[in-house]
Structures are given as C-alpha cells and as structure tokens.
Image: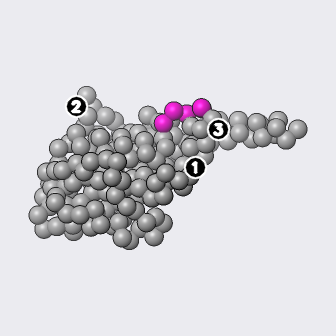
Amino acid sequence: MIGTIGLLFTFLVVFTGCSVKHAQIDLSADETLALSTPDDRVQDKILSLQKALQSLSSEVSEEEAQSFSRAAVLYPYYLAERYDLVAPPKFHNFLITIGLKERGLCYHWAGDLTAYLQQQSFKSFDLYRAVVEQGNLGEHNAVVVTAKGRPFSEGIVLDAWRDSSDLFFKKVDEDKDYLWVQNLKYKVIKG
C-alpha cells in the first residue's frame, strides 16, 4: 500500500505544479539573450550584479559589467527551459537520479554557465569553478567571477542551481551557506 501511495505522490508532484516559474528567455541565432516580456525584478537583478562586478576593480569596464550581468542572469532561465526544470533543486536532482530528467545537477549549471560566459569573450573578468565538499555526497558546484587577474577569494559566486535558475550571487567570503574553494579540476578562464 505504501508503495502505491508513494508512486501516486511522486506522480502528482511531478505532473502538477512543480515546474519552475521563471522569466521567459529568447535565444537568437547569434546566441543573444532577450527577455520575452519586460520583468522589473530581473532587470533589478542584472543591475545589482553589474554594480557588484564594478566594485571588484576600478579597471572593470562598465560596458562589460553590464553585458556580463545580463548574460549571467538571463542564461540560467534559458537553461531552466532546456533542463525542463522542476523545483526544488534537490527534487530535480532526485528526478535525474531515477532517470526521469537528464540535466540540472549543480555541476551542469556551473559547466553550462561557464561555457556560455566564456563564449562571450569578456576581457575584464576571469572565471573559476567553485566547489564545496568535493567528492562527498554534499558536493556543490558553482562559478566564481573575478576582476581580471584577481584571485578566487576576491570573486563573486554565481550559483544558478540554488534557487532553481534565479541566479544567486554574493562575494565568495560573504556566502554564509557554503565555504567555497577553487575546483582545481578546471582551468581558470582568463579574460
């Protein structure tokens, strides 16, 4: 009886209302991202990240900070559509584990976001891969952006997994949820 109830519960959760509501993104043929409809909350997030990036160094280009912020905030919404994302993140991970979903683990988010940002060829920033509890069950991955030539410890964490595609960002040393370290399995992407 419990097995039937569990299966029914899983079916209801998967197919009724657990999909993630997020900004709708259009991706043009040249990989340019655009909001399908205006969204003040998303625009505020882009501006907030831009200010944080500009605070990393006086040498950070305002134009690049704006472009980088737009890409870093919008691309996870695009990925949410590609991953057919459901919330919360740990439930989505469970669906991947049992074979109902293919992508959307934290390292997918980190890898796909890093690859997209790298394609943009930003000159003001370096990208690092970040990890906590590497090799353990609680392992979590993200991206860290720094001003060009600056160390990992001075960067900003970009975590698209944590809030189901709504980009979380904070200075590495100010993130109270995780003690991030540089994931040395990945090379630093120099701007």
- The mark nearer the N terminus, 1 or 2, is 2
User: In the image, which is nearer the foreground, mark 1 or mark 2?
Assistant: 1
Residue position for label 3? 14
- The mark nearer the N terminus, 3 or 1, is 3
Question: At numbered mark 2, what does the secondary structure look like: helix, strand or loop?
Answer: loop
Residue 12 position within the rendered picture, expressed as x and y whole percent measured from the top left:
71, 38
- The mark nearer the N terminus, 2 or 3, is 3
Q: Is residue 191 left or right of residue 34?
A: left
| Residue at the far right in the pictured view | 1
Residue position for label 2? 30
Badge 3, how many Cα within 10 Å: few under 14, some, many 20+? some
Assess whether residue 111 is covered by the magenta stretch.
no
- Of the residues shown, which amino acid type is indicated by label 3? Val
Residue 39 position within the rendered picture, expressed as x and y whole percent measured from the top left:
37, 51
Residue found 60% across the figure and 46% down from its top: 91
Question: At numbered mark 3, what does the secondary structure look like: helix, strand or loop?
Answer: helix
Q: Main secondary structure of the magenta part?
A: loop
Between 142 and 183, the one lying in front of the other is 183
Q: Is residue 65 left or right of residue 71?
A: left
Per the model, the C-alpha gap separating discs 3 and 1 is 13 Å
Between 22 and 148, the one lying in front of the other is 148
Q: Which mark is residue 90?
A: 1
- Residue 145 in sight from this viewpoint: yes
Per the model, the C-alpha gap separating discs 2 and 3 is 34 Å
Q: Quadrant of residue 43?
A: bottom left
Question: At numbered mark 1, what does the secondary structure look like: helix, strand or loop?
Answer: helix
Residue bounds of the magenta highlight: 99-103
Residue found 13% across the figure and 58% down from its top: 61
| Residue at the far top in the pictured view | 29
Q: Is residue 141 left or right of residue 3?
A: left
Colour scheme in use: one colour
Q: Quadrant of residue 151?
A: bottom left
